[in-house]
Image (cartoon, rainbow, N blue to C red):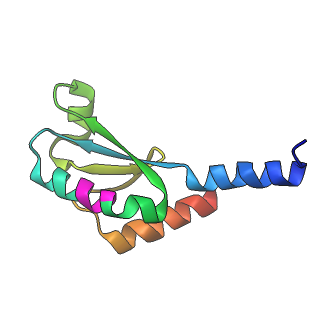
């Protein structure tokens, strides 16, 4: 039998840690590669998943993001574009988790 307090704690832990960071990118984009490498170096420490979305050939995404790639979102909320500043990303991720 699972204790309801343990179950609630587990749900809260999952809710807090299960962030998805989406990177809207293009094939062959050097800034995108650097941004993804930066995020990859932090993902274990900060417990998030990286999802890459290529905008090449998608008219809607190209219209939205065009030359701004990489565009970074945290759980679907815009974070930044062009570069990832590790300290800014850390603080934004923490604020995002506190609001959830």
Percent from the top left, x then y, of residue 13? 67, 55
Residue at 89%, 48% in the rendered image: 4
Q: Is residue 50 above or below residue 55?
A: below
In this rendering, would 73 be left or right of 27?
right
Q: Residue at x 57, y 55 (%)?
A: 17
Do we see residue 82 in this rendering?
no
Name the residue rendered at 27%, 62% in the picture: 38
Q: Position of residue 9 (x, y in %)?
A: 77, 55
Q: Residue at position x 47%, y 63% from top?
A: 46
- If the image is split into quadrants, where does the C terminus sit? bottom right
Q: Magenta segment, principal secondary structure?
A: helix
| Residue 43: image location, x then y, percent | 40, 58
Foreground pick, 50 / 44:
44
Residue 35 appears left or right of 42: left
Whether residue 89 is visible:
yes
Q: Quadrant of residue 64?
A: top left
Residue 66 colored in magenta in the image = no
Q: Find the residue positioned furthest to the bottom.
A: 87
Q: How many marks?
A: 0
Is the N terminus in the top left, top right, bottom left or bottom right quadrant?
top right
Q: Nearer the viewer, residue 96 or 21?
A: 21
Q: Nearer the viewer, residue 14 or 32?
A: 14
Question: Within the image, what quadrant is residue 80 found in?
Answer: bottom left
In-image side of 49 versus 97 (left or right): left
- The span shown in magenta is 36-40
Judge from the rendering whether residue 22 lies leftward or rightward of residue 26; answer left or right.
right
Q: Is residue 47 above or below residue 55?
A: below
């Amino acid at each position: 039998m699972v204790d309801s307090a343990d179950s609630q704690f587990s749900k809260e832990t999952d809710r807090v840690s299960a962030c998805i960071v989406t990177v809207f990118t293009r094939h062959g984009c050097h800034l995108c590669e650097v941004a993804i490498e930066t995020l990859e170096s932090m993902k274990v420490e900060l417990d998030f998943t990286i999802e890459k979305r290529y905008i090449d050939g998608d008219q809607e995404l190209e219209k939205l993001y065009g030359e701004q790639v990489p565009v970074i979102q945290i759980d679907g909320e815009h974070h930044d574009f062009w570069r990832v500043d590790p300290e800014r990303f850390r603080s934004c991720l923490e604020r995002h988790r506190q609001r959830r």
